């Protein structure tokens, strides 16, 4: 009898965790919608300011597409490796989850390093955000995305520590799912940034 009661209690607790996880995911979708509004506003601002170079350099003068393609490749591959981490999570393979998260973290860190180097190079050449409205819009849009990626990396590092300590419980699976949504969202935003800011800017 006591065995049946314990099993029923455990089942109810697990169901409660799953319900809480569903609510957390729903809440995170709401957050992503607000982030969509933020980036839509920044894209609209850039579209307005993109031609206001104030006699200074335009996109075709300062952007190096091969370099930016390298950045893009790192971020896109990091999305793939995070997908492998989620597959390992579904199998409850803690070791593989940590391995794939580590690869994803390394790729994301490489993306940030390349972006910081790009910003440093532009500012050193005298093309800082104060140079023109175009550059203000560029630094604001790309910098905001970069800050989001950096936030994702900090979150990922904390999750790796928690997975190592607590394993792949329901709570951790929900957190991994939320970060997955966030990371893939940043990939989509970056594809838009690459297309609108860099690609169209160079070929225009």
Image: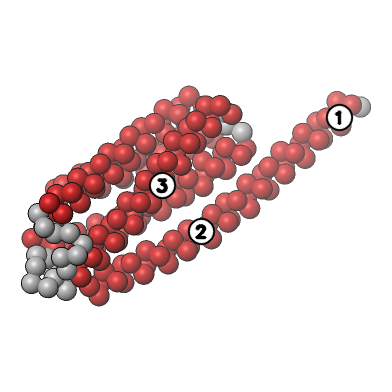
Q: Are marks 2 and 3 in contact (CB under 8 Å)?
A: no
Does residue 112 appear to the left or right of 53 in the view shown?
right
Q: Which of the marked residues, 2 or 3, is nearer the chain's N terminus? A: 2
Q: Which of the marked residues, 1 or 2, is nearer the chain's N terminus? A: 1
Q: CA distance from mark 3 to mark 1?
A: 45 Å
Q: Quadrant of the N terminus?
A: top right
8, above or below 189, in the image = above
Q: Residue 95 location in percent, x, y?
A: 48, 24
Secondary structure under badge 2? helix
Q: CA distance from mark 1 to mark 2?
A: 41 Å
Q: Is residue 193 visible?
A: no
Q: Are marks 1 and 2 in contact (CB under 8 Å)?
A: no
Secondary structure under badge 1? helix
Does residue 82 appear to the left or right of 136 in the view shown?
right
Q: Which of the marked residues, 3 or 1, is nearer the chain's N terminus? A: 1
Which quadrant of the structure image shows residue 35?
bottom left
Q: CA distance from mark 2 to mark 3?
A: 14 Å
Mark 1, Cα crowd under 10 Å, few <14 / some 14-19 / many 20+, is few
Q: Which residue lies under the disc numbered 1?
A: 4
Q: Residue 153 location in percent, x, y?
A: 40, 41
Secondary structure under badge 3? helix
Q: Which residue lies under the disc numbered 2?
A: 31
Q: Residue 14 location in percent, x, y?
A: 71, 38
Q: Quadrant of the C terminus?
A: bottom left
Mark 3, Cα crowd under 10 Å, few <14 / some 14-19 / many 20+, is few
Which quadrant of the structure image shows residue 6?
top right
Q: Which residue lies under the disc numbered 3?
A: 151
Q: Is residue 60 visible?
A: yes
Mark 2, Cα crowd under 10 Å, few <14 / some 14-19 / many 20+, is few
Marks 2, 3: nearer the viewer: 3
Q: Residue at x 37, y 36 (%)?
A: 105
Q: Residue at x 14, y 54 (%)?
A: 122
């Amino acid at each position: 009898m006591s065995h049946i009661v314990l099993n029923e209690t455990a089942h109810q607790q697990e169901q409660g965790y799953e319900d809480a996880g569903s609510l957390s995911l729903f809440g995170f979708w709401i957050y992503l919608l607000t982030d969509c509004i933020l980036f839509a506003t920044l894209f609209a601002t850039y579209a307005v300011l993109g031609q206001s170079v104030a006699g200074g350099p335009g996109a075709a003068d300062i952007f190096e597409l091969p370099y930016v393609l390298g950045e893009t490749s790192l971020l896109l591959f990091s999305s793939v490796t995070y997908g492998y981490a989620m597959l390992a999570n579904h199998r409850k393979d803690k070791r593989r989850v940590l391995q794939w998260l580590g690869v994803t973290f390394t790729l994301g860190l490489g993306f940030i390093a390349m972006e910081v180097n790009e910003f440093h190079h532009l500012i050193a050449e005298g093309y800082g955000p104060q140079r023109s409205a175009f550059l203000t819009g560029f630094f604001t849009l790309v910098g905001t995305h970069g800050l989001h990626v950096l936030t994702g990396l900090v979150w990922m590092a904390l999750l790796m520590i928690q997975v190592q300590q607590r394993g792949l419980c329901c709570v951790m699976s929900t957190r991994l799912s939320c970060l997955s949504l966030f990371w893939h969202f940043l990939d989509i935003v970056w594809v838009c940034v690459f297309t609108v800011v860099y690609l169209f800017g160079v070929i225009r």
